[in-house]
Amino acid sequence: MIDRFERFTIGVMEIFRYWHKITAGEMEKLGLKGAYCTYFSVLARFEEGVTATQLGELCCKDKADVSRAVSELEKRGYVTKETNGSNLYRAKICLTQAGRQVAEYVQQRANLAVSLAGEGVSEQDREIFYSTFQTIAENLEKISLSGLPEDK
């Protein structure tokens, strides 16, 4: 059982580390942080925009990280906040034209990275992997909310 735990944990950590290195290298070309990759990718899917809360949930980031990123991206002209009245809390964050161009670049580079990372993996194995990975993520979410059961 420990072998499975170590293989899973180290495997996830390795993927995260390598993905972070790739995104950092790609975003550095634009003078941006690698973590912004995810924001561009998510915002590109929502032309009508999303609130900061929604963006945090979609990107698995906390409020402070979202706030810093949005502030930086807004300062650079990649996003705007569209409000209904004066309530900035519920403002929709939208990509500008310049932001959409960066998002397109991010998506192209991400597609290339995912394609290269999946070389040698059959479509059937890929489907099984993603299904299994999603099930494990959902189970871990449940455990994180309720805690591990006590030993019997």
Image: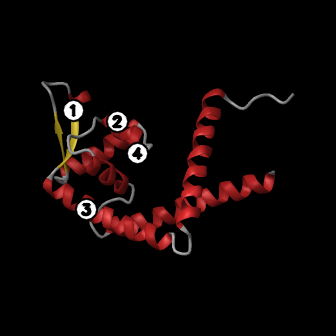
Q: CA distance from mark 2 to mark 1?
A: 11 Å
Q: Write down the quadrant of residue 81 in the picture.
A: top left
Q: CA distance from mark 4 to mark 3?
A: 17 Å
Q: CA distance from mark 2 to mark 4?
A: 9 Å
Amino acid found under the numbered disc labelled 4: Cys
- N-terminal of the pair, mark 1 or mark 4, is 4
Q: Is residue 136 above or below residue 34?
A: above
Amino acid found under the numbered disc labelled 1: Ala
Mark 1: secondary structure: loop
Q: Determine which residue is flagged by label 4.
A: 59
Residue count near mark 1 (Cα–Cα under 10 Å), binned few <14, some 14–19, many ≥20: some
Q: Which mark is residue 54?
A: 2
Q: Write down the quadrant of residue 24 in the picture.
A: bottom left
Q: Is residue 136 above or below residue 116?
A: above
- N-terminal of the pair, mark 2 or mark 4, is 2
Contact? badges 2 and 4 (CB < 8 Å): no
